[in-house]
Image (spheres, helix red, strand yellow):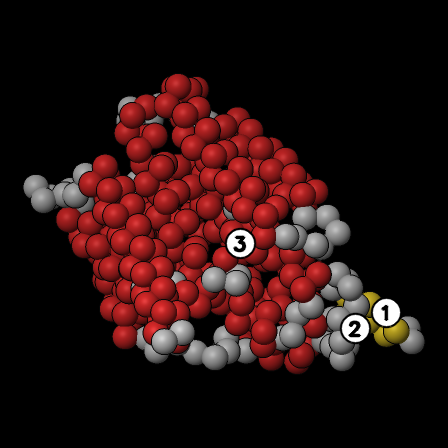
Amino acid sequence: MTPVTYLGFGLLTLILVILDIWQTRGGKITIKKAAIWSVFWFLLAFAFAVSIYFFWHVYAPDSSYSPQKATVSFITGYLLEKSLSVDNLFVFAIIFHQYAVPEHLRPRALLWGVIGALFLRAIMIAVGGQLLAEYHWLLYVFAAFLIYTGIKLAVDKGEDEVNPMPEKLIRKFANVTDDYRGNALTVVENGKRYVTPMMIVIGVIAFMDVMFALDSIPAIFAVTREPFLVLAANVFALLGLRSLYFVLQGMMEKFIYLKPALSFILVFIGIKMVLMGTAWEIPTPVSLLVLLVTMTVAVIASLRAQRKLEQAAHQ
């Protein structure tokens, strides 16, 4: 992969982030608008997949991947990251409730969280790719971690609040205002610099994203070891996360089978990682099919269960 490719993709990412800022200006996002933009980000990711198919030799002239393999790997990685990122949305909802974030400030808080996540994941991908290239045995450590996390998620009962560690660190080293000051992260009062609760919210979101990245980054390395595809899949998954949040915020409690589905996916990807390079290696198209079927079944089962609960409540 040439530096020009990464530079060009970095410029594309910057343009898309600016576009996302523009479409959420004013802080008022309706479900209809969020749904339209969610579809836009989804279609954009698949348009990029088409560009990989036709221009892979331009993106990565020295890659051992064929255009077909690169395209399937990107789509699988994107859907995997998108599936795992849905769990982030539940955490975002808890954070906003826990810190009483006003509705009109939530788009900006999510924006800063996504921007921070883009930088953090880029670093983690670069480090992870280098480590796997030099120490192949780390693949099995990642696999064990994914399987453990999947099992842990399956038996997790859920928590009412997120880890307060970022808040404790911020309050230890800075003075915090009692209320929000619009989108401002810091303010000056009486000649003294204060941070606002928005800074705490963004810090907590960034911290939680790092925790989620510890699952998702090793998981996508089981799909592809090509750093550019890993990075691209993460970028496109994160870009649509804000719009998806506002689409699903009123329906999150209905997805009762989401956690079992994500648990299964993590364990499956962990097993796939263990089997890489063996005679039983799971092909990437099979992984893509497993992802699609698992999430489809989880959504349909959740909606049917919710419908039964509503019918029982009306009887």
Spatial separation of the CA atoms under disc 1 and disc 3: 36 Å
Q: Is residue 291 left or right of residue 91?
A: left
Q: Quadrant of residue 76?
A: top left
- Mark 2, residue position: 194
Mark sitting on residue 235: none
Could you classify mark 1 by the number of other residues whose Cα lies within 10 Å: few (under 14), some (14-19), or many (20 or more)? few
Residue 22 image offset from top left, x and y in percent = 70, 42
Verify CB contact (< 8 Å) between mark 1 and mark 2.
Answer: yes
Q: Is residue 158 above or below residue 305?
A: below
| In front: label 3 or label 2 | 3
Q: Which numbered disc, 3 or 2, marks the residue that appears first in the sequence?
A: 2
Name of the residue lying farthest toward the front? 315
Q: Which numbered disc, 1 or 2, marks the residue that appears first in the sequence?
A: 1
Q: Which amino acid, mark 2?
A: Tyr
The residue shown at (38%, 52%) is 83
Mark sitting on residue 247: 3
Spatial separation of the CA atoms under disc 1 and disc 2: 6 Å
Q: Is residue 162 left or right of residue 276?
A: right
Q: Is residue 166 left or right of residue 303?
A: right
Verify CB contact (< 8 Å) between mark 3 and mark 2.
Answer: no
